[in-house]
Amino acid sequence: MSDTRGSLVVSGPATEMNKVVKNEMTKDPSRRRLIKSSFGIAASLPLASASLLAAASSEEAEGDAIQFDPNYRRRELRSDSIDYRIIQSPDIAIDPANPGQGRKENLERMLSLLDRSSTFFGGTPDLISFHEMPLHGFGEWDRKQMLRVAAEIPGAETEALGRKAREMNCYISFGTYAKDEDWPDHVLLLGVLIGPDGTVVARHWKARGTLGGLGLFTSTVYECLERYVEMYGWDEVVPVARTDIGNICLTGVQYDPLLFMTMAMKGAELFLRFATGSVPMADAQAMSRSYRVYTGYANSSAYPDHRYYPGGVGTGGSAIIDPSGEPIAVAGPAQGDIRATIPIKAFRDEHRVPSPQWELYEPVFRQFKPRFSPGWFLKYLPESWADTRAYFADKANW
């Protein structure tokens, strides 16, 4: 069985229960000093490059260092090709006053759509993706409301989806707001991957947010960077789930070439991207073409009565994109499914990780200071969108 520590879940022998890695702050003084020393360099660099640079300097920290391998770690594939499907479904916001009922109804919709996909396409899927928020939808909620809306991962919803994954013998991915007892009062936005054995095999944090721009206050790796690294190590900053259908990264981040380059350098073969409206497919195409990997881009379907996307603006257009950046399956605006066959073995036989000419760029990155430093959500957790914008109003470095 594989070790998927990068997804915060450890898969052990079949006789053991899969368990989420315990999130504990390290009490080892030498390890804490080492992590803090890394921030002298890392805090002044963009997230993707910073994580690699700091980890590379951490040779003393066993389990923390990121070891570059041009052949990258991988698992044996279960088949030469994978049947990949995206279910484009509506984003239906639930009532935070009665979140259990809303999540139940949205979960039932997901399960019904999974059954419909099997009936419509036939065959056996290997991977099915949903959009960013199929369990709860999108609403301009405050923190207390979002904590009520957020799911527990693993929890009741993943148990039900896990039973369906076992029945279909496939992986299921989706995004969700989540709460975690090790991060009290934080609202996370996770990319979740459920395996054909029914367990959660990956729960990838969103790497970074808008840093005050829109006022989003979900906790991300960047906004919690120091504590996150102390808990999980630098290798978890940009995690890769190494599965028997390929190496997978899940993210709701858009327009971040350095992040996707880092994923590809660590051996990602499939970018599973999710959105809830307003994200042009061109970005997904550019990242696939630049780093020569497959992309699944799962968006929500048009929902004319939606408060935030009137008339369905920005919705639809889910796509499966090949390593040349060409869409091989594209959805229209309405609810529906798309399907493509990915020749994963042939791809893997020819694939090479990116090889950036770092010496050209290092002088710039060495002196660069980002507009917003990491870690602001370790100091204060804003209560609302407006509170987030106000909190970041005086935090810019330039």
Image: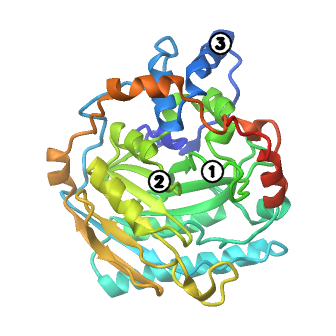
- Give x and y (percent) for residue 192: 53, 56
**Amino acid type for the residue under numbered disc 3:** Arg
Rendered image: mark on residue 33: 3
Q: Is residue 64 visible?
A: no
Query: Mark 1 highlights which residue?
Result: 209
Q: How many marks?
A: 3
Gap between marks 3 and 1 measured at Cα? 27 Å
Instruction: Name the mark on residue 250.
Output: 2
| Front position in the image: 177 or 14 | 177
Is 385 situated left or right of 132 in this image? Answer: right
Q: Quadrant of the image for the N terminus?
A: top left
The three-letter amino acid code for the residue at tag 2 is Leu
Packing grade of label 1 (10 A; few <14, some 14-19, many >=20) is many
Query: How far apart are the two marked residues, 2 and 1, measured between alpha carbons?
Result: 15 Å
Q: Residue at x 33, y 68 (%)?
A: 320
Residue for point 79% across, 67% down: 141
**Which element type, helix, strand or loop, lies under badge 2?**
strand
Residue for point 47% across, 53% down: 250
